[in-house]
Image (cartoon, rainbow, N blue to C red):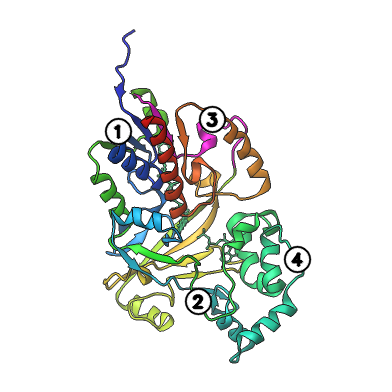
């Protein structure tokens, strides 16, 4: 039988999201490595992928992606490939028949008491509401220890049960703990000091990264399994799900998935909605509205045009429905809870023993990481490889 001739490359990279593309850019620009990226989807940019839809509106295909970071090193690195448009990420929560300021802050308190109030009054009120839990252990306690049961049930309980199909008591405190709670009037959804969107979108930024290096080939619509036998390589960079790499030998890691439904509006239909949004050209009053009520089947509606500032008459909204991973096959979220960490630990031990393979990214390390954290992790892993091969 004739042997299939294999193509030699320096690195075979699985996945064209942040982890895969940042690593390819570094290996090629700094070490002169020839890299091949295999990506099973038909586009680059992973879950950060954005595109212009049929209505002419720039949308985020896989849910809203708000870039934020406290790390100058990460912002500086990405700034070589994009300019930024600063954004004030403002959202609302819709429950009890109205829009509430969210995350919880003094403005929310004023809506609750239906009069003007001060931070001191809010603090005194919270003091009465708070549960005495010095060291919160889970996602319910992290909220009730700050604002008490009533606000927890109003804004967090139903949303979290829908999103994760778990009781918040089963989830790590970092899940709901991501959401700030403030005594002042700061309505910003996020905490990080740098908050901006790539001026021409994420996909354009990824394209610039790839165009900046000579020796990176991207194969779209190809999976790791289909291509691994075609190459020889000194390093494999694997950014897919770590349990899939090891053929789920310790059982499947739990993932939570989503289904996205898009609706575009223009003309008369949009004019009708402007009465609710209060803004010309917009369907809803903020870029994101969360729906914490359990009986509403979606968790949020995103109208990212608020953040992109795109000058276009039409608008598109995206409704986000939580879904089982088994239904969609898309592992959007690792599930931060004790049981899944115990399974992951076993895969991590195997991953650490694997020679010449780097497991990185949200799926490769089973971590609920934001984009900037994945860039940071990838730059650090690149430095390790650089030290290894420069010796
Ligand atoms: P991914 O972007 O998932 O890329 C991995 C790629 O590998 C995918 O394209 C996948 O198709 C490919 N792949 C997997 N297995 C294989 C295989 N076997 N063969 C070939 N290809 C394979 N972060 C923020 O900072 N701000 C936000 O506002 C934000 N919002 C989010 C909203 C949602 C709904 C989701 C799901 C995530 C959000 N994130 C946000 C997180 C952000 O998407 C991730 O941090 C980031 O995209 C992770 O990059 P990655 O390269 O690790 O993984
Ligand atoms: N959350 C909630 N109510 C909200 C917003 C968030 O209960 O109105 C909880 C929910 O469990 C969610 C988590 O906080 O999964 C983190 O929210 P975030 O908006 O950061 O989620 P992501 O954008 O990562 O999906």
Q: Nearer the viewer, residue 349 or 48?
A: 349
Callouts 4 and 2 close, C-beta under 8 Å:
no
Quarter of image, ligand 2:
bottom right
Tell me the distance, in whole angstroms, between the alpha carbons under discs 1 and 3.
27 Å
- Name the mark on residue 99: none
Q: What residue lies at 57% left-to-right and 62% top-to-bottom?
A: 178
Residues drawn in magenta: 232-253
Name the residue that disc number 4 marks: 133
- Name the mark on residue 246: 3
Sequence-first tag of 4 and 2? 4
- How packed mark 2 is, by other alpha carbons closer than 10 Å (few <14, some 14-19, many 20 or more), is many
Tell me the distance, in whole angstroms, between the alpha carbons under discs 3 and 2.
44 Å
Name the residue that disc number 2 marks: 187
Does residue 186 appear in the picture of this structure? yes
- Name the mark on residue 33: 1
Q: Position of residue 369 (x, y in %)?
A: 50, 52
Badge 2 marks a residue whose secondary structure is loop
The N terminus sits in image quarter: top left
State yes or no: residue 249 in magenta.
Answer: yes
Q: What residue lies at 65% left-to-right and 49% top-to-bottom?
A: 337
Tell me the distance, in whole angstroms, between the alpha carbons under discs 1 and 4.
53 Å
Q: Nearer the viewer, residue 46 or 263?
A: 46
Tell me the distance, in whole angstroms, between the alpha carbons under discs 4 and 2.
26 Å
């Amino acid at each position: 039988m004739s042997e299939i001739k294999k193509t030699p490359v320096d690195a075979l990279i699985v996945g064209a999201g942040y982890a895969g593309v940042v690593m390819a850019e570094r290996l090629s620009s700094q070490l002169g490595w020839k890299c091949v990226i295999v990506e099973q989807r038909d586009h680059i940019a992973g879950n950060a992928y954005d595109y212009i839809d049929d209505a002419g509106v720039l949308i985020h295909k896989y849910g809203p992606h708000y870039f934020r970071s406290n790390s100058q090193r990460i912002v500086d690195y990405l700034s070589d490939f994009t300019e930024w448009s600063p954004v004030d990420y403002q959202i609302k929560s819709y429950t009890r028949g109205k829009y509430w300021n969210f995350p919880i802050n003094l403005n929310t308190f004023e809506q609750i008491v239906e009069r003007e109030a001060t931070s001191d009054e809010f603090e005194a009120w919270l003091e009465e509401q708070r549960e005495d839990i010095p060291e919160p252990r889970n996602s319910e306690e992290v909220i009730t220890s700050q604002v008490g049961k009533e606000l927890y049930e109003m804004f967090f309980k139903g949303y979290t049960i829908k999103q994760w199909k778990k009781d918040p008591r089963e989830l790590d405190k970092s899940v709901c703990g991501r959401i700030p709670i403030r005594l002042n009037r700061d309505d910003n959804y996020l905490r990080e000091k740098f908050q901006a969107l790539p001026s021409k979108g994420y996909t354009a930024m990824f394209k610039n990264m790839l165009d900046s290096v000579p020796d990176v080939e991207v194969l779209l619509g190809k999976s790791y399994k289909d291509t691994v036998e075609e190459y020889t390589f000194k390093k494999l960079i694997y950014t897919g799900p770590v349990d899939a790499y090891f053929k789920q030998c310790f059982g499947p890691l739990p993932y939570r998935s989503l289904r996205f439904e898009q609706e575009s509006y223009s003309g008369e239909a949009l004019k009708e909605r402007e009465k609710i949004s209060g803004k010309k050209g917009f369907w809803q009053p903020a870029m994101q509205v969360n729906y914490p009520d359990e009986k509403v089947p979606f968790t949020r509606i995103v109208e990212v045009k608020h953040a992109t500032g795109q000058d276009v008459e039409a608008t598109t909204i995206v409704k986000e429905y939580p879904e089982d991973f088994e239904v969609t096959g898309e592992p959007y979220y690792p599930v931060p809870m004790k049981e899944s960490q115990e399974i992951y630990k076993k895969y991590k031990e195997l991953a650490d023993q694997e020679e010449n393979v780097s497991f990185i990214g949200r799926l490769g390390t089973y971590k609920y990481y934001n984009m900037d954290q994945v860039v940071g992790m990838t730059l650090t892993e690149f430095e390790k490889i650089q030290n290894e091969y420069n010796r």
